[in-house]
Amino acid sequence: MNIALSSIRQCLDGGVPAAIATCSTDGSPNVSYVSEVHFVDSQHVALSYQFFNKTRTNILGNPTAEALVIDPESGIQFRLFLHYMRTETTGPIFESMRVKLAGIAAHTGMASVFRLLGSDIYQVIDIELVGDERRDTLPGPVNRLPELRRCSEILSGCRDLESLLKALLAGLESELSIPHSILFLHDEVGKKLYLIGSNGYSTSGIGSEIPLGLGIVGLCAIERTPIRLTHIAEEYRYSSAIRDSAIESGIPVEIETTIPMPGLDEPGSQLAVPVVAGDQLLGVLFVESALDGAFSYDAEDILVTVANHFATAMIILDRGRSADESISPARNMTLRGRRPLRVRYFSSNASIFLGNDYLIKGVAGSILWKLLREYTQSGRNQFTNREIRLDPDILLPAISENLEARLVLLKRRLQERSNDIAIVAVSRGKFRLDVSRPLSLETVDPT
């Protein structure tokens, strides 16, 4: 091919719908539009098979097709000469396309209707520039390796999990010009994701939770596959049209919830990538922009690489945790002159309320309750990570307990929600509970 398929990947992002021309065995032509031509590799693309329509009927009888794709910035058009090879219903290509389609559908409750039946794989025989436009007017490839290197160096310089979390989100903005980002970690006990850090929003959302499988973040976690929505306004309209048609046809449509706050009111682009180490899901990195087409194939590649580096660093820091087993002596404290702070612990889900305000639940709630009980019973205010791990009342998973992450979550929630209780790092493997007000602890058992 005179034009490399990889050099026109920006034309395959769905910024402008592609036209697909096919011909039946009796010579009747047909032209239809698809939202995206999926880049597979340097010689292949894939089209989604969602319905048995005229295009699919034609290619099953006559496997030759042409696609017209358009660069969304310059308007330059390219004609792809295609040969249909096969339809895949399993495997990485199918899963990548299916999950993206499901991500679009999740915004409007179309998960059960708006679904992929197969990925039609085509070999790209040739690529032709359409019209008199010059190919060299297209912007050349941008070398983003320096940005990736700087992000990598920032992460490599971190010595604890909290600084690693801050460096990740700050580096996305300073080095990759991505100002809106959220990091979710995987809670294996609750089978959900919890928000541990965000950047660029008016509210942090620390402690927010997303069930696995819900929205593009939950789907990304389940499938461990990046999901990139490049033109959400268009995809909303497309999905909504299908949804309206389904309702008119009497097909039941379940309305699902979307990604909880924080988040942009009107995002143009969103990208979720899994944070994975080996076969272990650690979380999901989510970024978004108000601009359409903000995240290209290259941006996806970089974010996946950064997420992989973060996951590796997180595992290394966890394995290098201190083995210090010493327990600090009791510290008797008498706090006078202030009304006691009522702390309620609901044992059914390990949730904690400070006064009437909800603070945290789950494993993090169990940890805080242990600390508060120890403090009120003996006055002790210094603890080790190891004793938390060994406490049978704290239901940490046997594999990937992520204790440090839960302590960071708890610390940040207390910083946002309480002026009376704080967790402060003392040294590696040790931390201190600071309390500036008398406590009144109350356990609420389920009835």
Image: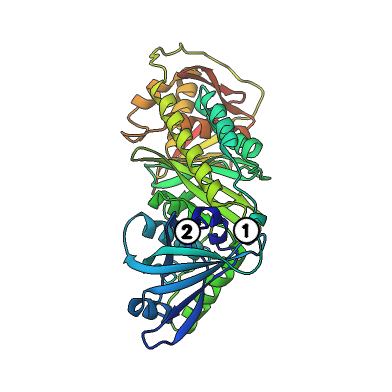
Amino acid type at circle 1 is Arg
Give the image location of residue 283, x and y in percent: 45, 42
For image coordinates 46% across by 84% down, the residue present is 29
Q: Is residue 236 left or right of residue 103?
A: right
- Report helix, strand or loop for mark 2: loop
Q: Which residue corresponds to mark 1?
A: 135
Instruction: Tell me the number on the disc at residue 215.
Output: none
Q: Which residue corresponds to mark 2?
A: 1
- In the foreground, 108 or 51: 51
For image coordinates 43% across by 31% down, the residue present is 312
Question: How many angstroms separate mark 1 from mark 2 (CA)?
Answer: 14 Å
Q: Residues within 10 Å of mark 2 (few under 14, many from 20)?
A: few
- Report helix, strand or loop for mark 1: helix
Q: Residues within 10 Å of mark 1 (few under 14, many from 20)?
A: few
In the picture shown, does residue 332 fall above or below 245? above
Amino acid type at circle 2 is Met
